Amino acid sequence: MMSKRVIFLITIFSMKGCMEQPEVIGLQIFSVMRTLWRVVSRNILFWVTFVVLLIYNSLGFLYSASAENYMPGYALTGNSYSVQGGILAFLFLGILFVRIEEKHSLHELYVSMQRGLFYQIAGKLAFAVLFIIVVFTSVYIMYAIIFIQSGLTDFRFYMDAYFYMLLYWGLTFFISLLLGILLATIFKGKIVYPILFLIWPLIGPINKMVFLQIGLDPFLDSSMLAAALNLGEFNPNSPFNALYGFSLEPYHWVKRWIWIAAVSSLILLVLAIKHYIKWLIGSGIMAVSIIPAYLFLNSSPFVMANNGTFYDRSAYETSYYQNHEEYDVFQQHIRLENYDILLDIDQKLQADVTVELLNKGEQPLHQANLTLYRQFRINDIRADGKSLDFRQRGDQVNIQFPKKLLSNEKMTITFRYEGVSSPLFFANRQAIYLPYYFAWLPGTHQAPAMADVRNGIHRITHHNDNQTTYKLRFNSSGELYTNLNQTDEGIWEKETNGVTLISGQIKQARIGDMKVVYPVTWERAAQGVPAFIQSLKQLTENIQQDLGLDGIDLPSEFVYVPVLSISDVYTSEYMWMGHDHLILNELPYLTPSENLLLRKFPPLTTKVISALTWKQKQIKPENFDFVHAFDLVYTHAYHQKHRLESSRGTLGLLQQMMKESPKDSEQYKALRTIDLGIRKHDNPQSIIDFTKEWYQFIDREDFDWNQLNTLAEDYFAMEDPR
C-alpha cells in the first residue's frame, strides 16, 4: 500500500510541474484537497466521529418528532451537545492539518514553490469548507426528512432551519478548524492538546455554565464575556419560541465573520513572522483592528439595537422595571382619536403617528401626559407644522402645548419616533409581536408599559378606552396578521380599541367560524381549537351570569402564540380579549399537542376571568394584588360549583400572597379574612356572590383593602380574625 509520504510527494511534484500554467490553479488546489482527503479518510477516528454524529442527531430528531415530545424548533436549538462536540472535532482536525504537513516536511516544499503557500492555504480551506458543508447538510437532510414525515411541511420553516445550521454549525465549525490550525502553528508538540481542552469549553454553548462555575474577576461582566466568546446558542436551555423562530439576526452573522477575520489574521501573522516578514505589518494591522470592532459588536447598545440574544428576554425588562423611575401622574381628561400610522420595521421600528387629542375635561389644558415604550425614542412632536416641547422619561412623555387646549377642543399631533422594541414584544425584520395592549403607540393610560410584580414581569394594559379609527400603512414581505381590515395594498383600517400586528413563523386558517392565527409548528395544537372554543364560550357565559356582566361577545379572531417569557408565573398574563380578537399565550416549552389548549393547569378559568373583567380596564401596578386575588377566589369557587378538577392550587397562591404581605397591612387582614372564610364555608355560590360584590370595587376602581375586609366579614359572618 502506498505510504502517506509517497502520496504527498507525488501530489507536490505534480503541482510543481504545472505551476507555471495559470489555467491549472484550480487543479492544483484540488490536488491539495485530494491529498488531505486521502490522509484524513484513512483515520478510523474520523469515520467513527462522523457516524456517531449522524446517529446521535438522528435519535434526537426522532425523539423530538414523537407525539409526546413534538418540538421541531427545539430539536435544533437544544441540540447543543452536537455543536459542542463538533467544535472539539474540528479543533482536532485543524491541528491534524498542520501536524501532517510537519510530519512530511510539506510546508518547506510549499514554500520553495512558486505560489506554493497560496495553494497550500487555499486547498486546506477549500477542503474544510466542503467537508463542513457535507457534515451539516447531512444532518439537515435527516432533520428535514424526519419532520416532514411528522406532518410539518412549511417551506419557510425549513429554509430558516438550513440557515440556522449554516450559522450555528457551519460557521462555528469553520472557526473551530481555524483555531486548531492557529494553535498547532504556534505550539509544537503535545502541549497544544491541554491548551485545546482549555479553549474548547469557553467557545461553545456550555461556556455560560463554565463561567458560572469558575468565577471571574468582579470587575468583569461574565455574561458579556461569555456571550462574546460563545459560538453556539448563548442559552441552549431556553425553549424555542415558535413565533419568533430561529435566532438569525445580523448580530450573530457579523460576530462570526469577525471571528473568522480575527483568527485568519492571526494565522497569517504567525506565518509572516516565521517566513515572510513583508506580511508582518499588514497582518498585524488587520489583527489589531479586529479588537475594537469585536468589542463594539458585543457592547450592550449594539446588541440590543440588532436584536441579539445577548440578554435573557425577561431579565432585561425585569432589571429595568424593578428600579424604574416614578411615573408622574396628574389629573387630565383626554382622549386620543383617529390614529394614522405610517410604520416601517427593519432592525428597529420607525413610526410617524398622527392622532387627534381631545380635551374631555372642563378645564383648559396646557400640557398632557402620554405613554410610549421607553426604547422608542421620540425625534419630534409637531402640531400645526410646529415642533412642540416635550420630555420623554422612561415610558412617560410629557407634552407642552403652545396654547391652552380648551374644553372639548381638539389638537392634531404627529409623533415621529424610532427604536428597538422590548425583548418581550419584538419588532424586527425576522418577526413582529406588537399586541394592542402594549404601549407601542402613544396612549393616555398614565402607567409604565410593564411592572415588576413579585419578581415577575406584568404587562400593563394600554389599549384605547374608546373605539376609534386606526389607519395603518405598512409593507410586509412575510406572513402578516393584524386585527384591522385591509383596504388596499399595504393599507389597513378599522374602528377598534387598538392595533395588533404579528409577523413571523405564523399560519392563518379558518377553523369553524373562527379565524385562527398560530405558529406553523403548532399545527397539532390547532386541532384542539374547536373543543377549546366550545369550552371558552360556555365558560364566558357562566362568568357573565355569575358577575352580572353585559355586552361581552367572543371575538371572531383567535391568536394563539407563545408567551414570551418562561418566568410568567401569573396566569393573568396569558389571555387578552380585545374588541375584535382574542389573544391566548402559551408556555413555549410545552409540547403543542392536540390536547394542549384544554390542559387542566393553569386553569382556563383564571385566564378568562381576568380577560373579561379587570383587563378591560386600565389597572395600575400597585393594585395588581387586589385583582389577582379576585381571580384566584373566583376560580376556586367556580371549580367547586361546577365540580371541576381540584382548585387547591389557587388557594395556595392566595395564601402565598397573604404571607408575602406585611402582617400589619390592610391587605394582609383582608386576605386572611377571605382565606379563613373560604375554608369554613362549603357553599361555592356564596363565594361567587361575594366575588360579584368584590368586582363592583374593581369596576369603579376602588381598591380599598379595608372595605374589602369589611365585605368579607359580612359575607362570611365571622369576627375580625385579628
Image (spheres, helix red, strand yellow):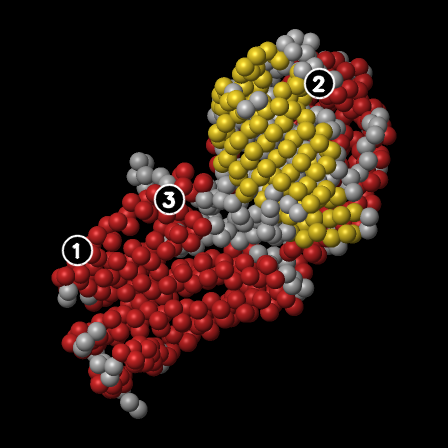
Q: CA distance from mark 2 to mark 3?
A: 46 Å
Q: Tell me, for residue 701, which label it has, or none.
A: 2
> Please, what is the three-letter code of the amino acid marked with disc 2?
Glu
> Please, what is the three-letter code of the amino acid marked with disc 1?
Ile
> Please, what is the three-letter code of the amino acid marked with disc 3?
Asn
Q: Tell me, for residue 261, which label it has, or none.
A: none
| Residue of label 1 | 281
Q: CA distance from mark 3 to mark 1?
A: 27 Å
Could you say which is closer to the camera, residue 647 or residue 59? Answer: 59
| Residue of label 3 | 298
Is 561 located above or below residue 443 in the figure? Answer: below
The residue that appears at 37% across and 47% down in the rendered structure is 228
- Quadrant for the C terminus, please: top right
Could you say which is closer to the camera, residue 538 or residue 425? Answer: 425
The residue that appears at 32% across and 41% down in the rendered structure is 216
Badge nearest the viewer, 2 or 3: 3
Chain-order first, disc 2 or disc 1: 1
